[in-house]
Image (spheres, rainbow, N blue to C red):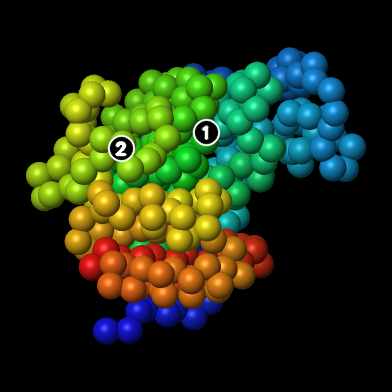
Amino acid sequence: MPPKNNNKKKISQGASRGHNQRGAAARREGGNITSRSRKKITPNRKGGFAGGKRPYDYAAYEREEATIDYMQRLFDKHEYKITKLELERFWQYYLLLRKRNAELDLTRIMGIEATVLKHFIDSAIISDLVEIKGPILDIGTGPGFPGAPIAIHKPRLQVILAESRGKRVRFLEELRSELKLKNTVIFSKSVRDDSPFVPADEKADIAKWDGEGELPVFSVVSRALEVIPSTLHRVKNFIPSGGKVIFMKGPNCGQEVTDSQQEFKGVFKMAEDIRYDLPGTGQSRRLVTFEKR
């Protein structure tokens, strides 16, 4: 059967919804970021980014004061439907990024507008575009992308956040604790042939994994880690038959796809190749999925 090849499309998640008691939730979680608190965020670092903005000064990147209500309006603007609990967790996530970014060098995507679109929606949306069976391993997750937003958006899906850099591991541990992401575990080493991953079966459950022993995996996701063939080499020994390796790519990854089909013929087959735009933008994406034979 030939792979699915969807035409490029806009993704709409439906109409926005109101959220009762959002003001109380905002206050409870540090709802408004006032001009006073903004000043505290700016780090004492040398250098700068494009456009003359100071490094890690979130306020310099924001069109409007960051509040939980403004975050909801941004999700609505991009026609991405989320629940009240998701909103509260994304807000906590954003506050933690602001708090820790200067110290830990987590991301150069800053400001609430860019964070919502390019981190939160860009990550979570893939779980709407393709069917994902867990446990899913996010290789090189950094500060949690795309795995943590997927875990927020799909709370019944088990997610393994793999990251070897110590500072980012500490951030992930804090994130997991603050957001109460009980459907995630953190693997704090590089993913290699001798990693403790094993093919998952129908009874696979990572909830009780304590850092020791085997860790079952059914699917893998990769965002801006390496070329497709390198990741397929990395995971081919622990992906079960029918398991998916999902690649978040830009629109011009054709050569990688061709090389992978040739090199892994008989091992993986290309199952999906979806071209789409981020909701409410003209920013093109391509989601390529290989399935283990």
> To which residue does mark 1 refer?
143
| Mark 2 residue element | loop
Can you tell which quarter of the image residue 106 is in?
top right
Q: Which residue is found at the position 48% from the left and 75% from the top?
A: 258
Q: Is residue 276 visible?
A: no
- Picture coordinates of residue 41 (x, y %)? 72, 20
Question: Quarter holding the N terminus?
Answer: bottom left
Residue situated in front as seen by the camera: 256 or 224? 256
Q: Is residue 27 visible?
A: yes
Circle 1 packing at 10 Å, graded few (<14), some (14-19), many (20+), is many
* Type of amino acid at the residue the image marks with label 2: Asp
- Picture coordinates of residue 278 (x, y %)? 57, 61
Give the Cα separation between the discs numbered 1 and 2. 24 Å
Q: Which residue is found at the position 42% from the left and 80% from the top?
A: 5
* Type of amino acid at the residue the image marks with label 1: Pro
> To which residue does mark 2 refer?
194
Residue situated in front as seen by the camera: 197 or 47? 197
Count the labels in the image. 2
- Picture coordinates of residue 33 (x, y %)? 66, 24
